[in-house]
Image (cartoon, grey):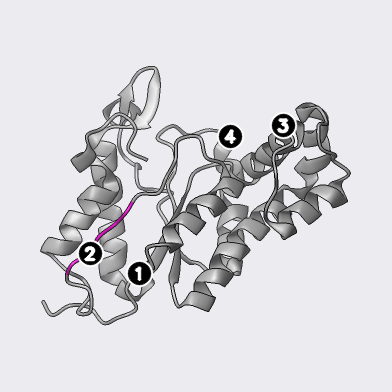
Amino acid sequence: MGWGVGDGETFEALLEDRLTRAPVSKAFRQVELLNYGVPGYQPPQQLVAFDKALELHPNAIVYVAAGREISRAADYMAEAVEKRLPIPYPALAKIVAQSGATQGMDQTEALKLLKPHGVAILQTVYGEIARRCAELGIRPVWVFLPQVRAGSWQEETPETVRIATAAGFAVINLADVYQGHDIDTLRLAEWDDHPNQLGHQLVADALYRALKENPATLFGSEPAAR
């Protein structure tokens, strides 16, 4: 999530700093946000990151989603099939079996079988995270973080938001976070559409506004005294 910017310039670092300087929750006047994101991870792989994050007994889990969550979920499962990767989550393994995809099958052929199950795969990923959070008393939060450039990835966004909401996540949709800004002021370079320092600042500001408006989303408490 912080590709191309300094450690203190990522949106989560900026948000953590602001929540500490200007708390929105009486119960949490000091906040620590830990980034478990791994470059290139697809939705099913987030279950692995989630398992690792649970080791620290967090108060909340924030899943940051980008575009094409449904398609990328199916793409990864097809890759896992071709590479004969273990699928340690029974519900996902069941979907693969029902699709007819078999271990070692060519990824292109596996994707043809798995693509119609993309929604079910993502529902399973989101549902597993939200269910386990509920069991452990952890608040599950889902943030949609758009790409700086408009494109076909936007087609899946409404359905993805519905899936996250139905799973039980508190949803913060930042689809309009870059609205009104020229792409050249937001991206790292003409050839790199990752958000630059300004892009991360806009995201941090939008998240802070959302949490200030509704602190219970992340903290489950009343706003801090002004």
Residue mark closest to the camera, 2 vs 4: 2
Q: Is residue 182 found left or right of 75 in the rendered image?
A: left
- The kind of residue tagged 3 is Lys
As measured in the structure, the alpha-carbon distance from the residue carrying label 1 to the one carrying label 3 is 38 Å
Amino acid type at mark 1: Leu
- The circle drawn on residue 31 is 2
According to the picture, the residue beneath numbered tag 3 turns out to be 83
- Disc 3 is placed on an element classified as loop
**Residue 152: image tag:** 4
Mark 2 to mark 3: distance in Å? 40 Å
Q: Which residue is mark 1?
A: 218
**Residue 79, disc:** none
Disc 4/disc 3 C-alpha distance (Å): 28 Å
Q: If you read the primary sequence from the N terminus, does the residue marked by circle 1 or circle 4 appear first?
A: 4
Q: Which picture quadrant has residue 9?
A: top left
Please give the range of residues in magenta: 30-34
Q: Are marks 1 and 4 in contact (CB under 8 Å)?
A: no
